[in-house]
Image: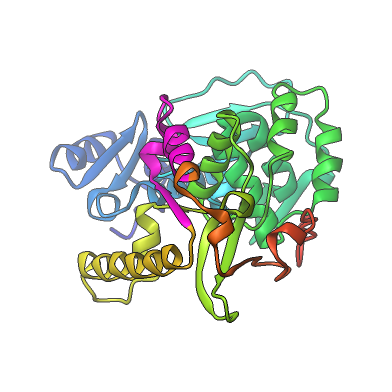
Amino acid sequence: MRDTPPPPFTRTEALVAGWTERRLDGAVGRGELTRIAAGLYAPTADWEPLRPWERHLALARTAARVTPDAIISHTSHAAILGLPMPPTPPQRATMTLLDDSRTSRDDAWRRFHRGRTPPSHVWIRGGTPYLLPVRTVVDCLRDLPPGDALAVVDGALRRGTVTASVLRTMREHQRRWPGIAAADAILSLADGRRESWLESVSAWRFHRLGLPRGVPQVVVLDERGRFVARTDVGWAEHGVVGEADGRGKYLADAPPGQPTDEVAARRVIAQGVRETRMRDLGLEVVRWDTGDALASDDRLDVRWRAAVERARPHLFRGRLVCSCCHRDLTDCPEPTWQGRRSAS
């Protein structure tokens, strides 16, 4: 319909565009429109095919359009930036009020934060105001569950969206804000070599279990220096490497038009072959999935310790090298992760 506002749209936008209350209610009753929340609609044919995070980003765009005294922030802005996110998005778009004195209540599809926002923290992109990426990263460090927050900062460091120095500056700006102490613990674990949400969540889980901190993205070479595999994490002193097996690992960059089950099956087989090659060199491999990383019990602890018990590091005939500096893991310096570029 030519007079339909961009989806999702509010009841007010529809009325301004010439709709009537009766027409709106009739379209919902016939299934032409989906009522997403009180006073918020989208054409059903457009809304139903969207995946969960696509729906969240659509909500965020609408929130930016219809809420002039607030700005997209926190999780919603991190998702817009393409930073690693958990499988399930929040139900509400996250915004920060520009006027800290405003008394505004959250509604069914928007969550409002308050915090001092100087003009220097506002970033105009494509004509829409956002908070600076570094502000969004530190906001997420304070607001999200620790594993999710670590994924955000790891992803931002990896992409060069932020650097260690600008993170420290923004952390100082927020030094008296709620949750900043938790942010410090997360920042101490940040590492831009991690490549997925699950890798970061797993690193936090290992930390909480009191297990050694592994080196992310380790390259395995054989005794002649030939490439064997690249693993998600490695513990050279224990002769153990780890693989975080999220569904996305087997479906990422799947060729268009190919059935996803066939693509996944081929990649699972290839994964098994490379694991066999690593075991033949004398390495022990420990694997886990999302359920293991999020479990409240000690299954990840038990699995890792069992791998260490089986391992015989003195029998390993190859080399483990860092993917960033190409040195042996025992010689790899602590990463500084000064990103290639920064929008902050």
Instruction: Tally the numbered discs.
Output: 0
- Residue 338 visible in rendering: yes
Q: Going by the image, does 304 lie left or right of 118?
A: left
Q: Which region is colored magenta?
A: 284-307
Name the residue rendered at 43%, 44% in the picture. 56
Residue depicted at x 78% and y 53%: 334
Figure check: 312 above or below 298: below
The percent coordinates of residue 186 (x first, y second) are 68, 35
Left/right placement of residue 304 relative to residue 250 reads right
**Residue 269 is inside the magenta segment:** no
Q: Can residue 69 be seen in this view?
A: no
Q: Give how far across and how far down residue 282 sits, in percent.
A: 48, 62
Pick the front one: 9 or 312: 312
Which residue is at 69% across, 24% downward?
179
Asked whether 331 or 216 is in front, the reply is: 331
- The answer to whether residue 297 is magenta is yes
In the displayed structure, 182 sits above or below 131; it is: above
Which sits in the foreground, 299 or 162? 299
In the rendered image, the residue lying farthest to the left is 30
Q: As drawn, is 260 to the left or to the right of 197? A: left
In the picture, residue 264 is in which quadrant?
bottom left
Q: Which residue corresponds to the image point at 48% horizontal and 37% vertical from the top-left?
A: 305
* Image position of 9 with respect to 111: above or below: below
Quarter of the image with the N terminus in it = bottom left
